[in-house]
Image (cartoon, rainbow, N blue to C red):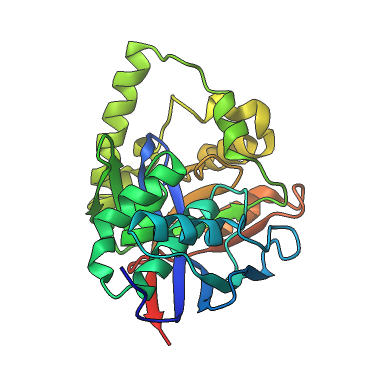
C-alpha cells in the first residue's frame, strides 16, 4: 500500500448525539466545522499547528488526536508511516457535547483516505468501524461521516441516514465550562428499570417520526429517562436550562454528554433561539446561543 498524494484538506462537522431518548444511537450533524490540512513529509517527525478552539492547549506532536488517528489508520490499512505536518483550524467547542473528539478521529481517518492510492479501502463503512473503535460508540461518528440525522447501532457497527424535516431549526446553547465525557458517563447507573426502558424505547421510536415527518411531536418525543436527570449533579446549570425551556414548551435536551443544550425550533412556529435568550435573562453569563443549521454532507476530503 502506498501514498498517492502528499497534501489533503479535510473538513468535518460537529454533531449532537442522543437527542433526548436516543442514547448512544441517534446523532445529528451540525454546520460547525473543523478543518485540517495534512502534508506527508520526508521528515519523520510529526508537527501540528492548532488554530482557533484550544490553540496552545492540545498536543502538537504525534499524540495529537488527529495525528495519532492518521498514524494508526496507516497501520491498519498496511501503509507505511510517514512524517506529518498538520494545520488544524478548530471551531467546534471541545468538551461541550458537540462531538469534537469524534470529529478529530474522523478527520484523521479521512485524511488517510485522501492520501492513499486505494481510497476504496476506507469506504464509509470502514471509516465508521475504525472511528467507532477509537470512540467506543458510534453515535457521534456516524453523523460526522454521513451528515444529516443518523441512527447507529452495535454490534457492527452500522448506521443509516434518517429523514429530517426541513422546518426543524436546531439551536445550541454552549456554556463556557467543559465536561469530560468520562465524567458524564461515570454518574450513570449500571441498571435501569423495565418501565424506564419501555418508556425510552417508545420515545426513541416517536423521535424518528417527529424529526422526519411531524415536528409538532418533538416535545413529547424528546423526553428522556435514562441519562439526563442522572447527570444533573455534574451539570446543574445545563439541566436547569433544559427544565426552563421545556416549561415554556421548547423541545430541549442535553447535547451528547453535555454540557451544551440543544433545542429544536420549528420554522414559522417556534423561534427557539428567542425563547432560549428570554429564559437566560442575563443570569447565566458566558453561554453562547445561536441557530446552527444541520450539515447534510458529512466529512469531506480533497487533495491539493
Q: Residue 241, relative to residue 29: is it above or below?
A: above
State the residue in front, 209 or 48: 48
| Residue 106: image location, x then y, percent | 43, 59
Please give the name of the residue rendered at 36% of the width and 65% of the height, measured from the top-left corner.
298
In the displayed structure image, the side of residue 122 where residue 302 appears, left or right: right
Image quarter (top left, top right, bottom left or bottom right) of the C terminus? bottom left
Instruction: Indicate the quadrant where residue 205 lies.
Output: top left
Considering every residue shown, the one lying at the far bottom of the view is 304
State the residue in front, 38 or 28: 38
In the displayed structure image, the side of residue 244 where residue 19 appears, left or right: left
Please give the name of the residue rendered at 23% of the width and 67% of the height, measured from the top-left corner.
120
| Residue 229: image location, x then y, percent | 54, 26
Q: Residue 93, relative to residue 259: is it above or below?
A: below
Q: What is the tally of numbered marks visible in this picture? A: 0
Image quarter (top left, top right, bottom left or bottom right) of the N terminus? bottom left
State the residue in front, 36 or 269: 36
Please give the name of the residue rendered at 41% of the width and 15% of the height, measured from the top-left corner.
192
Q: Residue 106, relative to residue 154: is it above or below?
A: below
In the displayed structure image, the side of residue 32 where residue 75 appears, left or right: left
| Residue 8: image location, x then y, percent | 44, 79
State the residue in front, 221 or 48: 48
Amino acid at each position: 500500500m502506498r501514498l498517492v498524494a502528499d497534501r489533503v484538506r479535510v473538513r468535518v462537522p460537529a454533531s449532537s448525539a442522543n437527542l433526548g431518548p436516543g442514547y448512544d444511537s441517534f446523532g445529528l450533524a451540525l454546520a460547525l466545522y473543523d478543518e485540517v490540512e495534512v502534508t506527508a513529509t520526508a521528515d519523520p517527525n510529526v508537527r501540528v499547528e492548532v488554530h482557533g478552539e484550544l490553540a496552545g492547549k492540545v498536543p502538537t506532536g504525534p499524540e495529537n488526536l488527529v495525528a495519532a488517528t492518521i498514524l494508526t489508520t496507516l497501520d491498519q490499512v498496511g501503509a507505511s508511516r510517514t512524517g506529518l505536518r498538520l494545520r488544524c483550524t478548530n471551531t467546534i467547542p471541545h468538551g461541550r457535547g458537540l462531538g469534537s473528539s469524534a470529529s478529530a478521529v474522523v478527520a484523521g481517518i479521512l485524511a488517510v483516505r485522501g492520501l492513499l492510492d486505494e481510497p476504496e479501502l476506507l469506504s464509509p463503512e470502514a471509516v465508521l468501524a475504525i472511528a467507532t473503535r477509537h470512540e467506543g460508540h458510534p453515535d457521534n461518528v456516524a453523523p460526522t461521516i454521513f451528515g444529516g440525522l443518523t441512527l447507529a447501532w452495535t454490534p457492527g457497527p452500522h448506521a443509516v441516514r434518517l429523514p429530517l424535516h426541513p422546518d426543524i431549526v436546531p439551536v445550541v446553547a454552549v456554556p463556557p465550562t467543559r465536561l469530560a465525557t468520562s465524567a458524564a458517563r461515570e454518574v450513570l447507573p449500571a441498571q435501569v428499570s423495565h418501565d424506564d426502558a419501555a418508556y425510552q424505547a417508545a420515545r426513541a421510536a416517536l423521535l424518528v417520526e417527529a424529526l422526519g415527518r411531524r415536528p409538532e411531536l418533538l416535545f413529547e418525543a424528546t423526553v428522556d429517562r435514562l441519562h439526563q436527570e442522572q447527570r444533573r449533579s455534574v451539570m446543574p446549570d445545563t439541566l436547569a436550562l433544559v427544565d426552563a425551556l421545556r416549561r415554556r414548551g421548547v423541545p430541549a435536551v442535553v447535547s451528547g454528554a453535555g454540557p451544551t443544550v440543544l433545542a429544536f425550533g420549528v420554522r414559522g412556529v417556534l423561534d427557539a433561539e428567542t425563547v432560549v435568550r428570554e429564559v437566560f435573562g442575563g443570569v447565566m453569563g458566558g453561554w453562547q446561543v445561536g441557530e446552527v443549521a444541520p450539515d447534510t454532507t458529512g466529512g469531506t476530503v480533497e487533495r491539493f
